[in-house]
Image (tube, coloured by chain):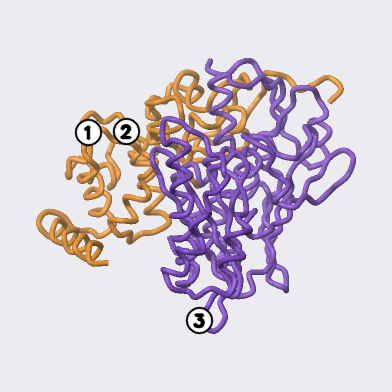
Chain colours: A purple, B orange
Amino acid sequence: MLLAPVEYYRPDTIDEALEALQTDGARPLAGGQSLISILKLRATTVDLLVDISRLDDLRSISVADDGSVTIGAGVTYDEMAMSPDLHHAYPGLSTIAAHTVDAQVRNRGTFGGNLCHNDPINNFPPFVVAVDAVMHATGANGSRDIPAGEFFTGYFTNALTDDELLTSVTLPPLNGRSIGYQEIEIGEAAARAVAIVAMSNGSIESASVALGCLPIPVRRPAVESALAGADSTPEAVAEATAAAGDGIEPVSDADASADYRRAMAPVVAKRAVLEAIQGGHHG
Amino acid sequence: MADGPAPIHDIEFTLNGDSVSRTVSSRMLLVHFLRDELGLRGPKIGCDTGHCGACTVNYDGKVIKSCMALAVQADGATIDTVESLAGESGDLDELQESFREHHGLQCGYCTSGVLMSAKFLLDRNPNPSAEEIREAIHGNLCRCTGYVNIVKAISAVAHGDSGLALIERLNREHATEVDA
């Protein structure tokens, strides 16, 4: 057996899941596309797997009248990719989901799992930070909302307590803004940027820019200020995004050095902004 | 939760059309259960890490890697392995036949996974482009064929051609992709 002995429980409701998560050593199992790998390696100790993958309350995508989108934490990448509602409200996000890893992982891996696991190579953490999403968590002591910018706390860690679940994530209305999403892959993703851009009369009205492939995805306020009101030309965007890598502390590993990742930050930031200017991410 | 959950569970699910009831350890991977407990040697173990796709099965209508799921999770599910493709008398289905005709395999180790991914693609998208075929088998590693004949075999089933007509059609598609 690859896995160490572990107990398994499949609750029928969120309340049952929360009760089970009170147990010492309990951990939620969603799509398992990261957690099962970790369990195979015996890189962490889990005594009880609480299988939340079939909880219907975690599995819906809903679009509100104002254009905001709430995605259940248990929605798979494939369900995101195939959702007409999401495609309409957040076209760039459904495209990102459609190209995440491979078909088998997309059929099993979940939006919430990708966010909670917060592996620096995961694609959704910088996305929710870029759009200022709100993370909805629930636990034995009630529910709370966590701004995406405060959700990620470091490598593989997040702001949830051990007995809390991420239940859904609300993305604010795009209101005509376009999504840029660019990465450089060397083995795994080495650098990634997400840009959300509003245009006005051919120039940039406002932009938010987030970088991924970091222990904590970060916004780049200085870059955002430089982009606001800037021309939409490649030269102007390159100038505004030139400092995107300043002060970030990426990891050095077998795929890429920290220096390389830092040097690529302005490259992916520029590309993401230009992609958004040109209409947005289409894969 | 007073007694705590048991590390052994009774599960019941549908496998290749038949109902199966078993008791499984909660730490057993689905692929080990299928191969070692149920004797289905179609799903292969190529990497143990969720990368190679040789263990791909259809699970509730969608392909998954059976080394990335627990057997206990299969309770209530409907699972089809590559063994579901051929008829009872052993007749190959059209996808398997096409892999044979177009030499879509050499050692064959990846084939059961590739076939399941290809079937999932064609169920969803009966007329895929070569690019869509390549994307659909992105999660299935083949170290023999270079994928060319795999794409050919899948494309031939989708478009109902073979021989020179198939090659010329794929060449035209490739030229369009390069132009784009």
- How far is the residue under mark 2 from the one under mark 3? 51 Å
Q: Which residue is mark 1?
A: B144
Q: Which mark is residue B17?
A: none
Image quadrant containing the N terminus of chain B: top right
Residue contact at pointers 1 and 2, CB within 8 angstroms: yes
- How far is the residue under mark 1 from the one under mark 2? 9 Å
Which SS class for mark 2? Answer: loop
The nearer-to-camera label among 1 and 2 is: 1
Residue B51 in the image: x percent, y percent? 42, 33
Which SS class for mark 1? Answer: loop
Residue B89 seen in the current view: no
Q: Which residue is mark 2?
A: B110
Picture layout, residue B35 above or below residue A186 = above
Residue B6 in the image: x percent, y percent? 73, 19
Picture layout, residue A108 above or below residue A242 = above
Q: Are marks 3 and 1 on the same chain?
A: no
Residue at 33 percent across and 59 percent down: it is: B128
| B120 to the left or right of B168 | right
**Which chain hosts label 2?**
B
| B165 to the left or right of A126 | left
Picture layout, residue B137 above or below residue A25 = below
Residue at 22 percent across and 40 percent down: it is: B146
To which quarter of the image does residue B126 belong? Answer: bottom left
User: Identity of the amino acid at label 3?
Assistant: Gly
Which of the pair B152/A269 is nearer the observer? A269
